[in-house]
Image (tube, helix red, strand yellow):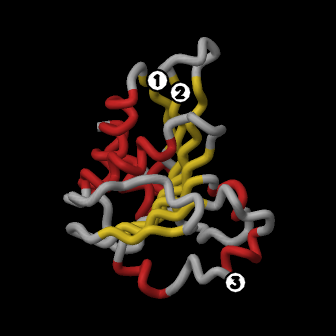
Amino acid sequence: MDRAAQDDLSGTVATGAPEQTRAIGRALGTVAEPGSMICLVGPLGAGKTELAKGVAEGLGIRTIVNSPTFVLMNEHAGRLRLFHIDAYRLDDPDEARAAGLFDERQADGVSVVEWADRLDGWLPDDRLEITLVPGLDGGDDRTIRWRARGPSHARLAAALVA
């Protein structure tokens, strides 16, 4: 793979069940490295939390992983620490900074950010962006698109094309 392709890996996959969405997250968690930043975007019910649960499974986390909507961030111990952030209730990206959602501890763990589009301008340039689009029928079908920004996240996204 040439350098340009390695630094900007993108793709799309269709899923038909929550377990398939979780399996995609599990693949990411299995290969995640310290400092990995996985940014999830999609409407309510798109599968963001299901994907985050899969990341947790891939990291060997055995505690219950739920959406941290009201507390903004949950931390879980596994092979690497998981910082599960939910920006749904934030009205302004500055609130993330004021709430202390991002700090030096995350350099040693994996961050999964639900509603990452609400933190535009505050996320690092090097990250994996994943957009979940529910099917038109309202069932479990969805399209998952990803784009890796930066070489470390291109390696992470390579797990999605393997």
Task: Measure the C-alpha gap from mark 3 to mark 2.
Answer: 34 Å
Q: Mark 1 packing: few (<14 Cα in 10 Å), some, or many (20+)?
A: some
Which amino acid does the dot numbered 3 rest on? Ala
Residue drawn at x 26%, y 60% is 63
Task: Measure the C-alpha gap from mark 1 to mark 3.
Answer: 37 Å
Q: Looking at the image, is mark 3 or mark 2 nearer the viewer? A: 3
The answer to whether marks 1 and 2 mark residues whose Cβ atoms lie closer than 8 Å is yes
State left or right for residue 134 relative to residue 64: right
Residue at the farthest top position? 137
Residue drawn at x 36%, y 74% is 109
Residue, disc 2: 143
Residue at the farthest right position? 92
Which amino acid does the dot numbered 1 rest on? Ala
Residue drawn at x 27%, y 56% is 31
Q: Position of residue 132 (x, y in %)?
A: 56, 36
Q: Secondary structure at mark 2?
A: strand
Q: Secondary structure at mark 1?
A: strand
Q: Position of residue 162 (x, y in %)?
A: 28, 37
Rendered image quadrant of residue 25: top left
Residue, disc 1: 14
State left or right for residue 87 relative to residue 155: right
Task: Measure the C-alpha gap from mark 1 to mark 2.
Answer: 4 Å
Residue drawn at x 51%, y 33% is 144
Residue, disc 3: 98
Tell me if residue 2 comes above or below residue 145 in the rendering: below
Between discs 1 and 3, the one toward the N terminus: 1
